[in-house]
Image (cartoon, rainbow, N blue to C red):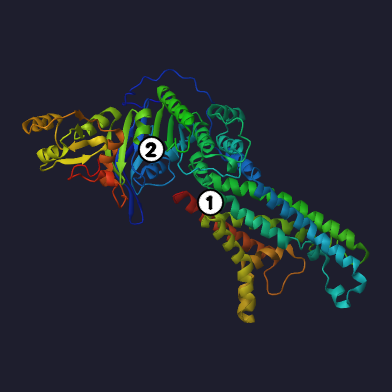
Amino acid sequence: MSATAAGTPAPVPAPARVRASPKGRVTQAHVLRSEWTKLWTLRSTRWSLLAAVISMAGLGVLIAAIQNSRWDHLSLHDRATFTPIDNSLGGVNIAQLAIGVLGVLIISGEYTTGMISSSVMAVPRRLPVLLGKIGVFAAVTFVLMIVSSFVAFLASQAILSDHIHASLSSPHALRAVVGTALYVTVLGILCIAIGSLVRSSAGGISAFVALLFVVPGIAAILPNSIGNAINPYLPSSAGTGITQAVPDAHMFSPWGGFALFCGYTIVAVAAAGWLFVRRDV
Amino acid sequence: MIQVRNVTKRYGAKVAVDDLSFDVPPGIVTGFLGPNGAGKSTTMRLILGLDAPTSGSVTINGKAYRDFDAPLNEVGAMLEARAIHTGRSGYNHLLALAQTHGLPRSRVDEVIELVGLGAVARRRVKSFSLGMGQRLGIAAALIGDPETVILDEPVNGLDPEGIRWIRELLKRLAAEGRTVFLSSHLMSEMAQTAEHLVVVGRGRLIADTTVEEFVSGASTGAPVRVRSPQGQALVDALAGEGVEIRSVEHGALEVRGLTSEQIGEAATANRIVLYELTPLQASLEDAFMSLTHDAVEYHASAEAPADAPVTELGANA
């Protein structure tokens, strides 16, 4: 392209210049590649993902090992209520925290450092940046979490094999193992949307913690009739049903609750995208 | 070619840019000058599509920034606030930018070489000095080999060698026919780099002119330097409406409001001996200050004592 726009004489005649670099083009695939690089080139990302994997894969196994060693000392009631599937997947409670915080930071970190300006200058239509972040983070989270939850489940059942254990063919076992990875993945997407809406790390993490840990606590102290009516609709209750083989009382079905959780996430992503394209950076 | 047309930007009640219009032509370096808070950075953000104008339009080579399929190949920009995640290495920052356009890794190596960051590119940006950060910002701006280069306060934090390097780089880019637009609040810096000037204050256009015209225009009304052993008598002889006299070092006076001819004749008429009579050129900073004086948002509350007009000879001599 010539630097001289029609009708505007250039004060200095432009010498013929060979373009030093090939011309590029912004595509969603290119932006995904860029977001992949951005994700893995920060130490905080790598530590958070490692923490999520270790807690998801390790906590259930640790609990299984402890329960197995003291099985003979457990009361009959404890033995009767021990749920080998849900115990093996208990690490999700910590993994969700690591993934949620990381989801917020992936976008809020760009606002706190000013990186978002560079990102938006490179991709001025903006939406591909948000979708690229969601795509890369969801794929990475799902792969890591599905492997971790299978490891947690299989290792735990192997440890418990002398006493009470489940297998993948046990009722709800496979659904809970896969569901755990699905829940954490969608939670990560929800947290990217929260980070994009709030645009600050402190605010985004607060919003995420409030939504998942504070609101359920408040619902728990409400009168039973009200609490039971509200509870199934809370994002945490709706989302976690799919991770449990033995469901809590007064909840939606696992897939029904998960569909609601996905619905919340879609609404949050749509709001984040709508604002991201329109707001000043 | 950047065209800014009747652009206004309000943040709540505050008007950051007020009906601003100007062109930035290709082939020369255009300076964007104004005191801090004049709206320079905001205008650049509007050009780059980061903020949307309240009214008016901005185009680069006829297109709005958002409509480019490969914006980094069209426009390269460095913002004043470093738009870099400091936890990433310089190399990875540039790589992530290049990848959005599908540019090869070899281009990242090229721009790192171009700005002289080869030795530190793999280190995290957190550990960079201000000057290294500026060089990284310039590398990011040049990664797509753009036709238009927009730099906000590029010499900030650079050492003298770095300043000379960037001046030569910008002149070379302009000589290649590119549009080069850089902001500064330092007039002296602009005079050495830019040919054309766009001056703003309080978000409004103050001047759109060549550096040469700007300086000569500002020299009218410049002071005359006078030295005389009969200083008090001279002050009495010259005093009058619109005349401002102040003492400077070594018994010399600076007179504003009279030409050197008028001062010489007044001295002769009053039989006052003159040792020196020198019309002074306005310095670039003076020119800038006089133009933007009303447009500076925050004045220092107390004037420096040396600037106080002199009524009694010898008070400051």
Q: Please identify the residue farthest to the top as the structure is shown.
A: A16
Instruction: Decide if residue B152 is on the left or right side of residue A193.
Output: left
Check the residue under mark 2 and report the chain it is in. Answer: B
Please name the residue shown 23% across and 31% down the image.
B280
Tag 1 secondary structure: helix
Pointers 1 and 2 within a single chain: no
Q: Amino acid at mark 2?
A: Ser
Q: Visible in this render: residue A147?
A: yes
Viewer-closest of A233 and B162: B162
Viewer-closest of B147 and A151: B147
Q: Residues within 10 Å of mark 2 (few under 14, many from 20)?
A: many
Please name the residue shown 62% across and 82% down the image.
A223
Mark linked to residue B184: 2
Please name the residue shown 66% across and 68% down the image.
A237
The vertical placement of A42 against B283, above or below, is below
Instruction: Decide if residue B151 is on the left or right side of residue A72.
Output: left
Check the residue under mark 1 and report the chain it is in. Answer: A
- Residue B151 on image: x %, y %: 43, 36
- Residue A42 on image: x %, y %: 64, 45
Q: How much space separates mark 1 and mark 2, taking CA atoms?
A: 25 Å
Mark linked to residue A112: 1
- Residue A166 on image: x %, y %: 86, 63
- Residue B114 on image: x %, y %: 54, 27
Viewer-closest of B227 and B67: B227
Instruction: Decide if residue B195 is on the left or right side of residue B242.
Output: right
- Quadrant that contains the C terminus of chain B: top left
